[in-house]
Image (cartoon, rainbow, N blue to C red):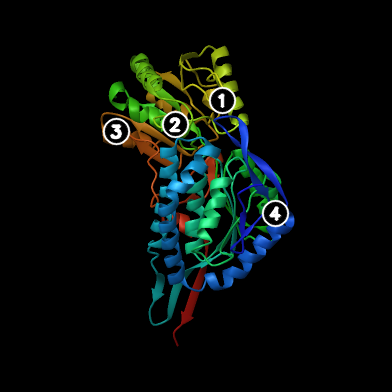
Amino acid sequence: MTGYSMTIDGSAVLGGATFGVVNPATGEVFEQAPECSREQLDGAMESAHKAYRDWRSDEAARRRALHAAGDALFAAAGDLAPVLTSEQGKPLSDANMEAFGAGVWFKYFADLEVPREVIQDDDNAFVEVLRRPLGVVAAITPWNYPLILASWKIAPALLAGNTMVLKPSPYTPLATLKLGELLAGVLPPGVLNVVSGGDDLGQWMTSHPTPRKISFTGSVATGKHVAASAAPDLKRVTLELGGNDPAILLDDVDPAAIASKLFWGAFQNNGQVCSAIKRVYVPEALYDDVVEALAEQARAVKVGDGTVEGNQLGPINNRPQFERVSELVADALAGGARAVTGGKAVDGPGYFYEPTILAGSTDGTRIVDEEQFGPALPVIAYRDLDDALERANATHFGLSGSVWSADGDRAAEVATRLECGTAWANTHLALQPNQPFGGSKWSGIGVENGPWGYYGFTELQVLHRAKQ
């Protein structure tokens, strides 16, 4: 019997069936999660719809509840972390930081100031632009950061006065189910419902008549399906999709000085970050030094079971992703690239893959042109900066990117020429709750975080009052 249940209308609900959850460090099923039925999803949607009436009417109560949710996450981080590590694979220290970080996001939105927008106040009229909640939000989260990416959706949506039905990835449902159980203790019944299941459940949610908004984080392919499913009902959508982030090094960088930041900008969470560095463009004169500096970082990293203290990178989360990374690296090697480090799976059980630095990579190969989402980094030489920028931008992706230089102003100027939602100068993966995050092109629609993310969970209403 599973020890995990869904949260519907504030109560623990078992599924009519269960599905297995795999520990990626062993490759074996270690737990069962509840499979939500259509009838249970209808119940969750109805619960959220009923709760919406009262929840939207008291902003002060919503802010108090979000503060309480943040406090609950801070207190429970140590309990949530082992669950997250078991299903996702990341080291316990990273899992603990993720759970704590989710609490930070709740606290931020609990205190977010939303200014009044008065656009006319004269003898003729008083005109104010109001931000009204949408209603029920259906949220679907991915397997790389289940808890913190859930908080990116829950906190602003609830602050705005919406209620929510949340579905985590079937690869990592357990910590999110525990999150639902935890927050049932601080939120009114129905305000946050957490259900679990496979792809069918996601399709049922996006086509369900109750939600007025879909907030989805995941792959480009699935995001397109979500948008198509939402379109007949004109549901609002926020889509945070894939990325193929370039990092462009300028000709004045010191490879040794930036190697650690560059490496972890690519390999954080074992490279399983939508906005991680996915390809590095380096001037020909610095190429060998940069490759060796990155290789030195890769050789020093400890890879292993996330429950073992000192391990810095865990396994790839799931077998399909493990096979994809393996396939892309093999294709690169067959095309003439060279694995300076790594290039193969780690012997033994689980989905472990050696941190891989690929030299001799070129644009036009799959691992450069596609999103690998794993611990393999191609390094590409360039002669002309304008050409490097053109190649970096020649992609359907547009999530983020970075430029590195000894001159911060120069790095910032070049970074503005990147076609992406976030352009970093001399850093990467610098994310924070007050900073909007989203992509251009196929990397998404809309943004999350900050007041801009909050606005995405609202609709405008003009209140125009004549003065006679």
Question: Pointers 4 and 3 in contact (CB under 8 A)?
Answer: no
In the picture, the disc for residue 410 is 3
Q: Position of residue 394 (x, y in %)?
A: 51, 30
Toward the viewer: 241 or 312? 312
Q: Position of residue 375 (x, y in %)?
A: 49, 26
Under circle 4, the secondary element is helix
Q: Position of residue 110 (x, y in %)?
A: 41, 62
Nearer-N-terminus badge (1/2): 2
In the picture, the disc for residue 207 is 4
Quarter of the C terminus within the rendering? bottom left
Residue 210 seen from this side: no
Nearer-N-terminus badge (1/3): 1
Nearer mark to the viewer, of 4 and 1:
1
Which residue bears the numbered disc 2? 308
Which residue bears the numbered disc 1? 325
Nearer-N-terminus badge (2/3): 2
Toward the viewer: 159 or 446? 159
Up/down of 55 relative to 424, above or below = below
Q: Tag 1: Cα neighbours inside 10 Å, few (<14), some, or many (≥20)?
A: many
